[in-house]
């Protein structure tokens, strides 16, 4: 019975985001690895997660590439929003 | 309208951070490395295309010239992908900046010319004087050939910049004209829209052709000098 109690308590650091309770959220965020190598690791994990799910499959479709390009267009739109908001269709500019 | 027309050619910065670094590095994301004999569809397509282009372009060179194969293939992939990505809405094209194109053209041209001067000095100097020129014309012709040699990198860079910039400007202008004409006369707006579609098709072709021309000329300068 002592072993089952120990096994059911998972340390906070190793929980995935969806398993973290709301009250524990700030301490979970603070415990994440914010060193440069940690952030690089996060980008690498994210890249391989997307790549292995949509591109590195036996019958990859155009969607894998198109989603990346759509995200690129959206990010560029956000970047140039400041200049673009003057080009709305209005009677008086 | 005038200020907006050239606003898309300003180097993108955000809060003082150079976003342009990320934009220049983005095409490399679209070319994954292959780690297997039989890869996924994206990599297989890219490998097939690369084999096609490299066989066609490197076949004219001798052994020494073919050591440049990696450089030339990377060049055509980079320029082609950067130009094509620039055709997406709201995106920034690094090849519209003369500074970047000069940075590509001058080292490559200088590398080819200096290789020629180091390994085949007599033949390289002989390029300055075409065969069979009458003796009185020789000084003038040497000057003209020197000028034409030194103008090669400038021409490479300016050709690429001007073509891509002009294409983007035309798309902006005709697109703006279509939008303005819609409320005035719908038929004219429709004609302008068809012109816009044809222009976009042209721009896709120009994007790839310019990459090809740039690389071909560098390879030609190399062929002269190896």
Image: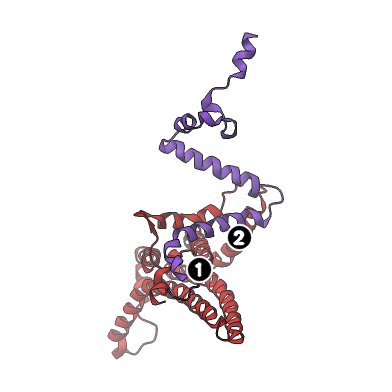
> Residue A38 placed where, x, y %?
45, 36
Residues at marks 1 and 2, CA–CA distance in whole angstroms:
16 Å
Q: Is A92 located above or below residue A74 in the figure? A: below
Chain drawn in purple: A
> Residue B131 placed where, x, y %?
39, 83
Bin the neighbour count of mark 1 within 10 Å (Cα to Cα): few under 14, some 14-19, many 20 and up.
Answer: many
Name which of mark 1 and mark 2 comes first in the sequence: 2
Q: Quadrant location of the C terminus of chain B?
A: bottom left
* Residue under the point 37% across and 76% down: B127
**Residue B25 appears in the rendering:** yes
* Residue under the point 38% across and 63% down: B11
In front of the other: B171 or B93: B171
Disc 2 target residue: B51
Q: Pointers 1 and 2 in contact (CB under 8 A)?
A: no
At mark 1, the secondary structure is: helix
Query: In which quarter of the view is residue B104 placed?
Result: bottom left
At mark 2, the secondary structure is: helix
* Residue under the point 56% across and 71% down: B204
> Residue A18 placed where, x, y %?
59, 34
**Residue B35 appears in the rendering:** no
* Residue under the point 56% across and 76% down: B202
For the residues tagged 1 and 2, is the chain the same? yes
Q: Mark 2 falls within which chain? A: B
Disc 1 target residue: B211
In front of the other: B33 or A83: A83
Q: Quadrant location of the N terminus of chain B?
A: bottom left
> Residue B86 placed where, x, y %?
50, 66
Q: Mark 1 falls within which chain? A: B
Q: Is B180 located above or below residue A83 in the figure? A: below
In front of the other: B109 or A42: A42
Say which colour chain B has. Answer: red
């Amino acid at each position: 019975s002592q072993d089952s109690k120990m096994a059911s308590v998972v340390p906070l650091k190793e929980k995935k985001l969806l398993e973290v309770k709301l009250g524990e959220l700030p301490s979970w965020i603070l415990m994440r690895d914010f060193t440069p190598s940690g952030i690089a690791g996060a980008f690498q994990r994210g890249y391989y997660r997307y790549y292995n799910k949509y591109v590195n499959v036996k019958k990859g479709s155009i969607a894998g590439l198109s989603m990346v390009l759509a995200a690129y267009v959206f990010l560029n739109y956000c970047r140039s929003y400041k200049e673009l908001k003057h080009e709305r269709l209005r009677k008086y500019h | 309208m005038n200020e907006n027309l050239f606003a898309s050619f300003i180097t993108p910065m955000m809060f003082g951070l150079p976003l342009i670094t990320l934009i220049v590095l983005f095409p490399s994301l679209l070319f994954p490395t292959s780690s297997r004999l039989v890869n996924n569809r994206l990599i297989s397509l890219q490998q097939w295309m690369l084999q096609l282009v490299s066989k066609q372009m490197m076949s004219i060179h001798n052994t020494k010239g073919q050591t440049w194969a990696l450089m030339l293939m990377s060049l055509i992939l980079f320029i082609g992908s950067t130009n094509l990505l620039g055709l997406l809405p709201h995106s920034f094209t690094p090849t519209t900046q003369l500074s970047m194109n000069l940075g590509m053209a001058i080292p490559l041209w200088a590398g080819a010319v200096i290789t020629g001067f180091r390994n085949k000095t007599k033949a390289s100097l002989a390029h300055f004087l075409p065969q069979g020129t009458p003796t009185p014309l020789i000084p003038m012709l040497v000057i003209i050939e020197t000028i034409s040699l030194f103008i090669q990198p400038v021409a490479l860079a300016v050709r690429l910049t001007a073509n891509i910039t002009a294409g983007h400007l035309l798309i902006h202008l005709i697109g703006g004209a279509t939008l303005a004409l819609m409320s005035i006369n719908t038929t004219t707006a429709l004609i302008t829209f068809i012109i816009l579609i044809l222009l976009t098709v042209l721009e896709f072709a120009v994007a790839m052709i310019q990459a090809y021309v740039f690389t071909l000329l560098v390879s030609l300068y190399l062929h002269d000098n190896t």
